[in-house]
Amino acid sequence: MAYIGTPPSNAFTSLLKQDFSTSATTGYTLDHAVNNANDIALFINFVRQEPTAAYSASGTTLTLTSATASTDDMYCVYLGQALQTVNPPNASVGLSQLTATGTKDSTTFLRGDNTFASAGGDNSPAFEATLTGSSQIINNASYTKIECNTEVYDTDNCYDNSTNYRFTPTTAGKYFVYGKALFDSTAGNMRMVISVIYKNGSALTLGHTNFHTNTSNDAEGGSAFVATVVDMNGTSDYLELYGYVSTVNNGTAGVDENERRTAFGAYKLIGV
């Protein structure tokens, strides 16, 4: 007939035993980590000791209330319940026990999807560069690339500061890009100045400053700032900073190279 109730066990569990080499000390090391003294049965000279009164245990540390002698016989039995506790003993789980993907080290954290990621996210590739050395001349009514030639930082070497003066990020995503330029003219003949972000050779967005149209109030200098968010494919897409001036009588203007008054930068956004 069929068996009614919980089926009998078809396997048995053997409790582990550990023998100690005794000496005149109170401190010993357990082969297996435990939660507390109740997780082992300790015997000295074949007499079972009372947990917490005669000894304490935590992790792999066993501490006796009184020191043993070198002639004593001491062993412990690991009780089955200690091997099936819900929570692992303190300090018993290390990096080698984790199976998450990614690189586990002091700079990463474990995410909810069981992968390791850089702490705080990563805004790279990122850069900022400024114009230094000498003022760059901008002709009237002409869009001219501004040659920011000195890098403040360039995390992934994605900005060319000597030839094309462009940012070509190697990671796809959305980027915050910005630029500013201070235009000046000793002739005092500027009507309007514009800073323009170009993507792949075409104007993407601009920021401008208009001056009074009356010739007696034309400006000698002015700054224009521009910023936007742009999608980059991480391979061929690139960004550049351009400048534009409108002057009286087709005059020229210079882009100031001092004190980071002219700069170009971008960084990858996180979580968008």
Image (cartoon, rainbow, N blue to C red):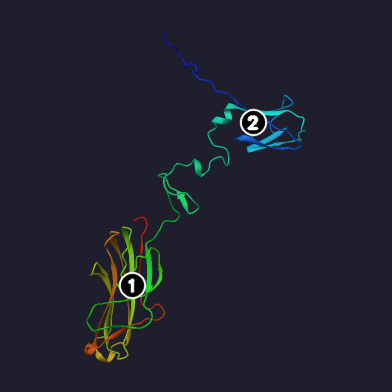
**In this picture, residue 53 sits left or right of residue 144:** right
Three-letter residue code for mark 1: Gly
Q: Is residue 124 left or right of residue 138?
A: right
Q: Secondary structure at mark 2?
A: helix
On screen, residue 76 above or below 200: above
The answer to which quarter of the image holds residue 17 is top right
| Rendered location of residue 250, percent (x, y) | 22, 88
What is the crowding at mark 1: few (fewer than 14 residues within 10 Å), some, or many (at least 20)?
many
Residue occupying the point 40% across, 81% down: 258
Q: Earlier in the sequence, mark 2 or mark 1?
A: 2
Q: Residue at x 33, y 70 (%)?
A: 160
Between residue 57 and residue 206, name the one nearer to us. Answer: 57
Residue plotted at (32% across, 90% down): 186
Tell me the amino acid under the disc marked 2: Asn
The quarter in which the N terminus is drawn is: top left
Relative to 87, 268 lies left or right: left
Q: Position of residue 241 (x, y in %)?
A: 30, 73
Q: Residues within 10 Å of mark 2 (few under 14, many from 20)?
A: some
Residue 83, position as x, y percentages in the image = 56, 30
> Quarter-wise, where is residue 38 in the image?
top right
Per the image, the residue denoted by label 1 is 179
What distance separates the C-alpha of mark 2 from that of mark 1? 68 Å
In the displayed structure image, the side of residue 10 where residue 127 appears, left or right: left
Q: Is residue 167 above or below residue 74?
A: below
Return the residue nearer the eye: 184 or 116. Answer: 116
**Residue located at (64% from left, 35% from top):** 30
Q: Secondary structure at mark 1?
A: strand
**Residue 38, labelled with which disc?**
2
Mark 2 vs 1: CB contact within 8 A: no
- Residue 97: x and y in percent read 50, 40
Q: Is residue 83 above or below residue 139?
A: above
